[in-house]
Image (cartoon, rainbow, N blue to C red):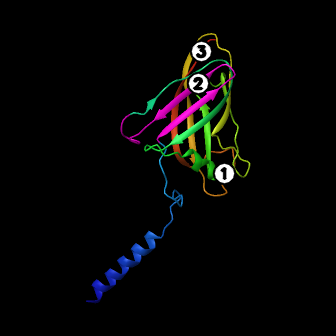
Amino acid sequence: MKFPFALASALVLLLAVSSCEKHSTDHGDEHMVPAIFRLLLVSQTDTATATWSDLDGPGGNQPQTTTLQLRPGTYQGRLEIFTADGDTLTTVIRQQGTEHQLFYTPSSTLANIVTITIADRDARGMPLGLETSWEIKQVQAPISSSIRIQLYHYEPNTKDGQSPSTETDADISVPVKVVVP
């Protein structure tokens, strides 16, 4: 009789301890999954847009993308992020800016042609990445490649503005074509 009671007590204690464990990926709020990215770039003479969407999430169908067509010059960029239901995440990311940062990485083909600078800052003065400036150099022939965009989530007070976090909220690739004017 004592054995079943001791076993039941041990199981209850184990459940109580394991349910209180806080995981490093627990954001403290309901985490909405980014599913749609809309990138808008505007120069004095051109407007370029691209959309990346993965409405069924990782492991389902391939993401749908449009190609960002760029001409030589300087563009001001804005990135908007949404859930699959169309709820905006842009405002949440901006409000929780000290816990988020976007990194833009041109492919090796575009590394010497496209320079992307973060234009917005979080409440601590660190780069955020929803607003950017793009410098596109002159090319002799059209070049097609991609830009990788990564959204990282940081634990409070760990963001240094330069290093990616170990926690990735999104990692996408946007096709890019640099054209001859």
Number of numbered labels in the structure image:
3
Q: CA distance from mark 2 to mark 3?
A: 12 Å
Residue 43 vertical position relative to residue 162 in the rendered view, above or below? above
* Secondary element type, mark 1: loop
**Residue at the image position 59 percent from the left and 37 percent from the top:** 79
User: Could you tell me the amino acid type at mark 3?
Assistant: Val
User: Could you tell me the amino acid type at mark 2?
Assistant: Ala
* Secondary element type, mark 2: strand
Crowd class of label 2 (few under 14; some 14 to 19; many from 20; radius 10 Å): some
On the rendered structure, is 91 left or right of 19?
right
On the rendered structure, is 91 left or right of 120?
left
**Which residue is under mark 3?**
179
- Observer-nearest residue: 130 or 12? 130
**Which residue is under mark 1?**
159
Crowd class of label 1 (few under 14; some 14 to 19; many from 20; radius 10 Å): many
Looking at marks 3 and 1 on the same chain, the residue that comes earlier in the sequence is marked by 1
Q: Marks 2 and 3: which is nearer the front? A: 2
The residue segment tinted magenta is 35-61
* Secondary element type, mark 3: loop
Return the x and y of residue 106 as percentages of the image width and height: 60, 29
Q: Marks 3 and 1: which is nearer the front? A: 3
Residues at circles 1 and 2 in contact by the CB criterion of under 8 Å: no
Return the x and y of residue 128 as percentages of the image width and height: 66, 44
Q: CA distance from mark 1 to mark 2?
A: 31 Å
- Observer-nearest residue: 112 or 26? 26
Residue 161 vertical position relative to residue 49 in the rendered view, above or below? below
Residue extending farthest to the left is 1
**Which residue is under mark 2?**
48
Return the x and y of residue 74 as percentages of the image width and height: 70, 24
Q: CA distance from mark 3 to mark 1?
A: 36 Å
Looking at marks 1 and 2 on the same chain, the residue that comes earlier in the sequence is marked by 2
